[in-house]
């Protein structure tokens, strides 16, 4: 009789021949790719849905933001800003909508377009304004976001992003933070395109209002001077706004191509507010 002699296994079937680090990278890469595909797909669906959102639903979203900013307790109305906004709206088909502009007392050089046709301008921005034309460009820029429905797209993308990460990893996890940081760069580049479109929209709108575009670049030039761009230019890659100098260059090109005139600016004094 033959005696059976078992052969020795040359490897352990329970241990991968590849490095654990390599296996982890493959797993993580596949997971990120899957999440990204779902995110992009939902983003495309969002672009289809946003233009079809009923005004009533948008107004309900606006009420939520109104509670967050405590309109008008914290953010107050300014008669001059509202009159200027109304003048700009007459140049648009949007003038049948009720847009409101509020001033929020914070040291931020910024303005926001919020659901519900609300524009918030921070007091620090108004303090930097020298002309009505300069302020008109800021307000027209925010109106550009409304016309293109950027505020709803941003809100929707944030909801989709948060939903995916919370389902996969939970609301409070290091993995969620890592994935959000990984996609933030791509997301901000998309937002920068929206900012560029809003700039071009604002330039055209103030040209309709004043028959020239004097003051359109003033605020951007102030930002360029105030912020040390030589040191901070890297951070604009991850910012929602393009580099101020890039925005100025794009607007200057548009002014040359469209042949816009440069007229007289109307003074604006921040300390005379109502």
Image (cartoon, rainbow, N blue to C red):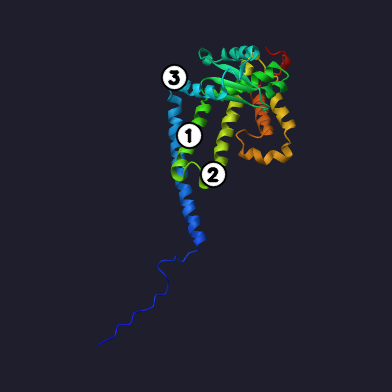
Callout 2 crowding tier (Cα within 10 Å): few <14, some 14–19, many ≥20: few
Q: In which quarter of the image is residue 194?
A: top right
Q: In this view, does 63 lie to the left or right of 133?
A: left
Callout 3 crowding tier (Cα within 10 Å): few <14, some 14–19, many ≥20: few
- Image coordinates of residue 26 in percent, x first then y, are 48, 55
Secondary structure found at label 1: helix
**Circle nearer the N terminus (1, 2):** 1
Secondary structure found at label 3: helix
Which mark is drawn over residue 13? none
Q: In this view, does 96 lie to the left or right of 79?
A: left
Secondary structure found at label 2: helix
Which mark is drawn over residue 177? 2
| Residue appearing at x 42%, y 70% in the figure | 12
Q: In which quarter of the image is residue 208?
A: top right
Which mark is drawn over residue 159? 1
Residue occupied by mark 3: 56
Viewer-closest of 86 and 254:
86
Q: Can residue 52 be seen in this view?
A: yes
**Vertical placement of 146 versus 160: above or below?**
above
Is the N terminus in the top left, top right, bottom left or bottom right quadrant? bottom left
Nearer mark to the viewer, of 3 and 2: 2
| Residue appearing at x 66%, y 35% in the figure | 243
Give the distance between the C-alpha atoms of the residues marked 1 and 3, in whole angstroms.
Answer: 19 Å
Task: Point out the residue furthest to the bottom here.
Answer: 1
């Amino acid at each position: 009789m033959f005696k059976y002699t078992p052969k020795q296994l040359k490897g352990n079937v329970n241990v991968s021949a590849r490095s654990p680090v390599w296996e982890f990278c493959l797993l993580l890469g596949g997971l990120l790719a899957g999440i990204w595909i779902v995110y992009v797909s939902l983003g495309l669906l969002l672009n289809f849905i946003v233009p079809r959102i009923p005004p009533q639903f948008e107004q309900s979203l606006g009420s939520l933001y109104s509670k967050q900013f405590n309109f008008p307790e914290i953010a107050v109305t300014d008669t001059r800003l509202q009159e200027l906004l109304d003048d700009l709206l007459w140049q648009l088909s949007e003038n049948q909508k009720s847009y409101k502009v509020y001033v929020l007392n914070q040291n931020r050089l910024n303005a926001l377009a919020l659901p519900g046709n609300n524009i918030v301008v921070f007091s620090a921005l108004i303090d930097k304004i020298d002309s009505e034309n300069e302020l008109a460009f800021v307000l027209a820029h925010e109106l550009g976001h409304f016309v293109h429905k950027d505020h709803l797209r941003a809100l929707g993308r944030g909801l989709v992003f948060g939903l995916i990460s919370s389902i996969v990893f939970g609301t409070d996890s290091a993995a969620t933070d890592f994935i959000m940081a990984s996609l933030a760069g791509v997301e901000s580049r998309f937002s920068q395109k929206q900012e560029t479109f809003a700039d071009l929209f604002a330039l055209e709108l103030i040209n309709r209002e004043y028959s020239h575009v004097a003051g359109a670049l003033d605020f951007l030039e102030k930002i360029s001077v105030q912020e040390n761009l030589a040191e901070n230019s890297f951070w604009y890659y991850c910012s929602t706004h393009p580099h101020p100098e890039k925005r100025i260059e794009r607007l200057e090109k548009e002014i040359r191509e469209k042949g816009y005139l440069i007229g007289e600016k109307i003074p604006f004094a921040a300390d005379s507010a109502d």
